Image: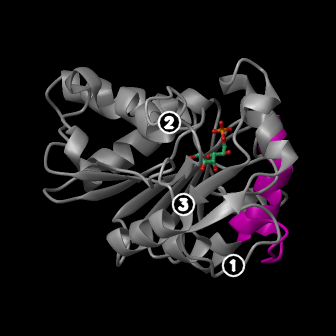
Amino acid sequence: MQVEIHPTPESGSARAAEQIRGRLVEGFRLGVATGSTPLAVYAQLRDAHRRGELTLAGATAWALDEYVGLPRDHPQAYRNVLHAELVADDATGLSDARLHAPDGAHHDPRAAAREYEQAIGTGVDLQILGLGANGHIGFNEPIGSLRSQTHVGRLTPRTRQDNSRFFDDDIDQVPRECITQGLATIMRAHEIVLLAWGEHKAEAVAQMVEGPISARWPATVLQQHPRVWVYLDTASARDLTLTELYHHASA
Ligand code: F6R
């Protein structure tokens, strides 16, 4: 793992966006996360597109996960969130047809999960990840298989509580199930860029970077991937101990 500790989420996001921009080529397969963490990176990609410095026109984007059971037009369905971030108003040049997500409204979610796993095939070129406070990546919650493929999963009460802020602070509106890329699916990505900001992620960050590989903290599986970049702010890096090994970026 390459770990970079930034003074602020803004400077970490700028570095991550710069790395992603440097990788984009025709036919690039970009894995995209939702949640709050990558929003500043997406904003940077939109700004670069506005300035004519970047286009995702020749790329495809692949959602990490999707809620099960939300109506297809629900604003919090992850495909719609990603559409708003990356497609709407020619945000990045990415077209709607090139934005892929598991079909959470499918009458058979397990079949939808299998179809998505097949569509991802050998893996994306670069996967953007956030990190759950409980150590999840995608919606791979603690104690699931470290070798899972895309599957239907149950969200923990903690994750539903964390995500209720997107549902009028009402946990009852947060779906109980999701379709998520599995940990084995994520591990097939050629490169991984994981972002984590804020003190509430500090324990999960310390486990992911310095803890033993364990299904208790699913993100620890990334220790076995050869090309992972971790962008942190000082708050999320709080509990790391091998600080002399990490790159400390200045503002
Ligand atoms: C999002 C996802 C989740 C989030 C994680 C962090 O597609 O799969 O793993 O990345 O829950 O969420 P935020 O960024 O809202 O703190």
The image quadrant where one finds the N terminus is bottom right
Which label lies toward us, 2 or 3?
A: 3
Q: Is residue 227 magenta?
A: no
What is the quadrant of residue 86 in the picture?
top left
Residue placed under numbered mark 2 in the picture: 13
Residue 165 vertical position relative to residue 220 in the rendered view, above or below? above
Q: What residue type is labelled 2?
A: Ser
Residue 248 vertical position relative to residue 138 in the rendered view, above or below? above
Say which element carries label 1.
loop
Q: Which of marks 2 and 3 is nearer the N terminus?
A: 2
Q: Where is residue 238 in the image (x, y as percent from the top left)?
A: 83, 44
CB within 8 Å, label 3 to label 1? no
The segment highlighted magenta reads 199-220
Residue placed under numbered mark 3 in the picture: 109
Q: Distance between the residues labelled 3 and 1?
A: 21 Å
Residue placed under numbered mark 1 in the picture: 146
Q: What residue type is labelled 3?
A: Pro
Direction from residue 169 to residue 95 in the image, left or right: left
Residue shown at 48% from the left, 69% from the top: 111
Q: Which amino acid does label 1 sit on?
A: Leu
Q: Position of residue 127 (x, y in %)?
A: 44, 58
Query: Label 3 neighbourhood size at 10 Å, few (<14), some (14-19), many (20+)?
Result: many
The image quadrant where one finds the C terminus is top right
